[in-house]
Image (cartoon, helix red, strand yellow):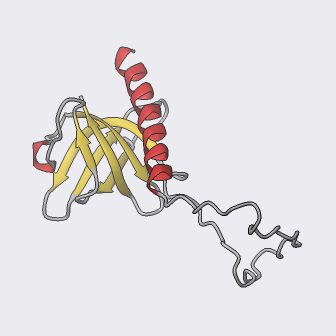
Amino acid sequence: MKKLILAIVMAGSFVCVSAYAQEAAQKPEEAVPAETAAVPQAEEPAAPGAPAAEGTVVEEPSATENLEFVSGEVSGVDEAAKTITVKLYGETEGETAEKMLTVNVDENTDITDGEKDRELKSLTAGTEVDVEYDPASKKATYVFVY
C-alpha cells in the first residue's frame, strides 16, 4: 500500500513539475507600453475544422495532456528495439490472460529509482516499475524503478 501511495504522489509531482518546466521554457512575451498597445478586437470563433485567420495562434494540445500511468513488473527488455514489456498490476479476476504493455524508450525517457538515473539494460524481469507513457505512440516518458 505504501508503494502505491508513493507511486501516486511521485506521478502527481512529476506531472506538476513537467507542466511547470514546459511553461517556464516558453519565451515570455515582450512588454508593450500602454500608450502603443493595440486594443484587440473581438472576433467570431471559427467553425470547427476551418482554417485559422491570418495572425491567429492555434494552440496544439500539450503532449503531456494525454499521458497514462501504469504500475507493473518488467517481463522483458529488448535493448536492440529499445522496448520494455510490463506485466500490469490490477484487477484480473475472471480474466485468463495477463495484461501486458510494451512501450518504446529513447534518450528522452527518464528512467530513475528516485536517487539516480538508470539505464535500460539495468531493468530485468521481475523489476517493479511505474511507467508514464503516451498511449497513442506507446512511447514511455518516465519509468520509476522500485
Q: 47 above or below 15?
A: below
Residue that sits furthest to the front in the current view: 35
Query: In this orientation, does residue 146 appear?
Result: yes
For the point 82% across and 68% down, which residue is it?
A: 40
For the point 87% across and 72% down, which residue is it?
A: 43
Query: In this orientation, does residue 92 appear?
Result: no
Hey, which quadrant is residue 55 in on the image? bottom right
For the point 32% across and 55% down, which residue is it?
A: 103
- Judge by depth and name the residue closer to the eye, 33 or 118: 33
Q: 37 above or below 109?
A: below
- Judge by depth and name the residue closer to the eye, 30 or 12: 30
Residue 16: horizontal and vertical position, in percent? 48, 38
Q: 45 above or below 7?
A: below
Hey, which quadrant is residue 139 in on the image? bottom left
The quadrant of the picture occupied by the N terminus is: top left
For the point 19% across and 64% down, which residue is it?
A: 81
